[in-house]
Amino acid sequence: MATKAEFLEHLDGVLAGIERDGLFKRERLIASAQGTHVAMAGREMLNLCANNYLGLADDPRLVAAAEAAMRGHGYGMASVRFICGTQDIHRTLEARLAAFLGKEDAILFAACFDANGGLFEPLLGPEDAIISDALNHASIIDGIRLSKARRYRYANSDMGDLEAQLLKAREDGARFIMIATDGVFSMDGYLAKLPEITALAERHGAMVMVDDCHATGFMGPQGRGTPAHFGVEVDILTGTLGKALGGALGGYIAGPQAVIDLLRQRARPYLFSNALPPAVVGAGLAALDIVEAADDLRARLFDNARYWRAGLEAAGFRLLPGEHPIVPVMLGEARLAQAMARDLGERGVHVAGFFFPVVPQGQARIRTQMNARLTKGDLDFGLEAFAAAGRAVGVI
Ligand SMILES: *Cc1c(COP(=O)(O)O)cnc(C)c1O
């Protein structure tokens, strides 16, 4: 029998292995609000790696709404929703989200990780099937694992494979079939092929669930997300308040009334975890007010994305194609991505390198993300730093 000391030694060995493989993640301290610029180690840095697409994370209107909600509704709920944790503003936010997304109702969770974690298990049983894109977010993968439904996986956005899995699930006698996909695959910035997915679902009698975390608020008309962008309907949407909708935290599921009603009875992260704090709910309502009227911010966001892409391409970097404000700069090896991120940091640009296991081996990258509030001056500064860092590490 191994001792506790041996267990901790074993963990030290695992950590040393992560370090040896160049995969160790270090957190850098921000000493300011999240914004287009952040204070790090006493220095102001241009920030190109937050999911702060509309720049609302430090918006004074959200701060004021959070303060007002705390004054009227207090700091914390000290309860789950169904015991004594539901305030009027929780229901108001759920109704607003449902209306915004064109669904019958919505249910809040502490995070979208919890929404995806709690979604599948109450809705689908061992007679049913879930067909999941291979690049889906970790929370979808975990949520599916927690359900008893049969699992099928299709290669990322491979519609032939999706159809093969639909046929297989039918052959295996599945009662209900649900296709689960990210609306946007966040490592690549690629959009799910929702027109094809919804057509296949229709043909094979399946339902479609879309996790639209990297789209709600800015993709599609009024920022209603990838289904709106493509002009299609999906059955269930999940999303977060932690990205474009203010960037704090909080997740939700929107869908048909019966789905939301059953989740309120059975979804474990909802039943056994605290209600969202009033400040987050109040600011979430303010974020929706802003987002619904934010065509100007959305135009600036996509204008910035086009300008940034064109500048990086002109400098000779290899990008993944697309129009989403996620712009990945492909570098190959993890160490190269880390060296480049470090070099950019020294030049006053904060970016994050992504490498295995978050992306496949040999496809390390720096994922840059645009924000509506970045100015052309900011972007030119960033482009100069990228060109200099790219030459310093030898990728251009
Ligand atoms: C960010 C993200 C989540 C997690 O959202 P949280 O609210 O931060 O838990 C889930 N799914 C996708 C696709 C995401 O990008």
Image: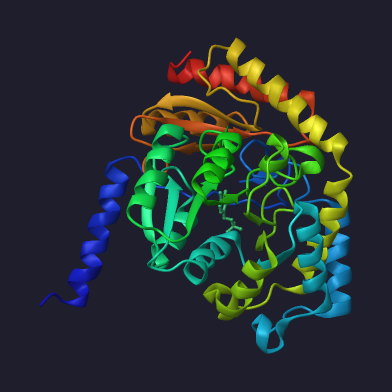
- Camera-nearest residue between 176 and 370: 176
Q: Which residue shows up at 68% across the image and 40% down it?
A: 232
In the rendered image, the vertical position of residue 351 relative to residue 52, given as above or below: above
Please say if 260 is above or below 386.
below
User: Can you tell which quarter of the image residue 197 is in?
Assistant: top right
Residue furthest to the bottom: 83
Residue closest to the eye, 370 or 10: 370
Residue 259 in the image: state x and y as whole percent.
62, 67
Q: Please count the marks in the image.
A: 0
Percent position (x, y) of residue 92? 83, 69
Does 309 appear above or below 79? above
Q: Name the residue: 71% across, 20% down.
A: 307
Q: Is residue 109 left or right of residue 205?
A: right
Q: Quadrant of residue 37?
A: top right
Judge left or right: residue 374 versus residue 337.
Answer: right
Q: Nearer the viewer, residue 238 or 176?
A: 176
Where is residue 325? Give x, y as percent: 66, 33
Left-right relation of 27 to 49: left
What residue do we see at 80% from left, 38% from top?
Answer: 221
Coordinates of residue 286 in the picture (x, y in percent)? 85, 58
Q: Quadrant of the N terminus?
A: bottom left
Q: Is residue 292 left or right of residue 144?
A: right
Q: Is residue 313 visible?
A: yes
